[in-house]
Amino acid sequence: MTQTAIPYIFMRGGTSKGPYFRRADLPEDQETLADVLIAAVGSGHPLNIDGIGGGAAVTTKVAMLSVSDDDWADIDYFFAQVSVEEKLVDFKPTCGNILSGVGPAAIEMGLIAPKGDETEIRIRAVNTGAQVVANVQTPGGVLTYDGATEIAGVPGHAAPVQLSFRGVVGSSTGAFLPTGNLHDTVKGIELTCMDVAMPMVIARAADFGLTGYESVEELDANRGFFDQMEAVRIEAGKLMGMGDVSQSVTPKVGLFAPAREGGTIAVRYFMPWKTHPTMAVTGAQCMASCALTPGTIADGLLDRPNTSPAEVVLEHASGKIDVLVEFSIDDGFTLNAAGLVRTARKLADGHVYVPKTVWDGS
């Protein structure tokens, strides 16, 4: 054969989807690994026509799983964001939506056995070091995807996957506020730069001349806004100690506006070169934390809860996402844990093929 076969499971995790691999079935060195993922996804074409990607950033995500050697964790989750149109792979961030499929995929792969009607799986996010407890529905010791839980951005309903995140503060930069400030001004735009689960640059939509209620299509068509936002993001990345971020998907950018659908605050989230169709799980934690922190860019945009745990309802482009935040305010805002409910579903399994010229499987 002129191609290398790699076993995989294709999963929807939250509002994203992509291939889930055993880490042991892929090359060890990261350069070859990146080449394999680019070939598998079909990166470098807007439709990913020569791979299994779906032509959007939320469908070119990859999860790689292994039994953890960490004393706390059961499963190690290594994430890769593969670019759609450029042959690039970013191993810096993690993805909470894809993470919602990690527990079910680990059971499917035989990496962990179901235990009782609900199986608790402790997951270490290798990219950031975050600790996540996933509770997966396994009635009678059998994994199920059937259930009554609905999430915005996904049709129908499915079994809930409860996620509880810990150790996410400063997971990429080492600091809750990477610039040391609650407020920064970059190229005339007021910002809060925050690192909770995902390093982010957060601003008011109005400061970019937007309402914050625009659709995904309206935002993506506004190239003047994207050019301005990217210039701000690159400069903010330097202030956050992240160096030149022009070829990295982090930091992500988020916008705030007052809620208008009964939620806590309205948000828009960027990946960063396109608008997210819904809301990232990691980004939701960061934006909820920013909304709860006095002195940030969120001041004046919401009635801020001051008791813990607090339910923060983010109104995004396709609906709402609820984040249950445990925090303390004894010495400034301190995030203790964030919980979300997602769903996942196995879509396919088998082998994905890459040319032997990319990797011969050795």
Image: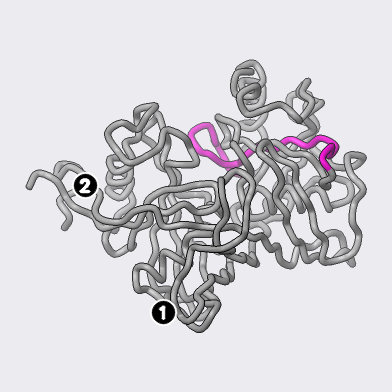
Q: Is mark 1 on a helix, strand or loop?
A: loop
Q: What is the chief secondary structure element of the magenta stretch?
A: loop
Q: Is mark 2 on a helix, strand or loop?
A: strand
Query: In the figure, residue 218 lies in which quadrant?
Result: top right
Within 10 angstroms of label 2, few (less than 14), some, or many (20 or more) residues? some
Q: Quadrant of the C terminus?
A: bottom left
Q: Which residue is identified by label 1? A: 113
Image: 32 above or below 106: above
The span shown in magenta is: 241-261
Q: Which amino acid does label 1 sit on?
A: Ala
Q: What residue type is labelled 2?
A: Tyr
User: Looking at this view, is 16 or 329 the one in front?
Assistant: 16
Residue 292, position as x, y percentages in the image: 83, 53
Q: Which residue is drawn at 49% across and 63% down?
A: 145
Q: Residue at x 83, y 61 (%)?
A: 310
Q: Is residue 279 shown left or right of residue 305?
A: left
Within 10 angstroms of label 1, few (less than 14), some, or many (20 or more) residues? some
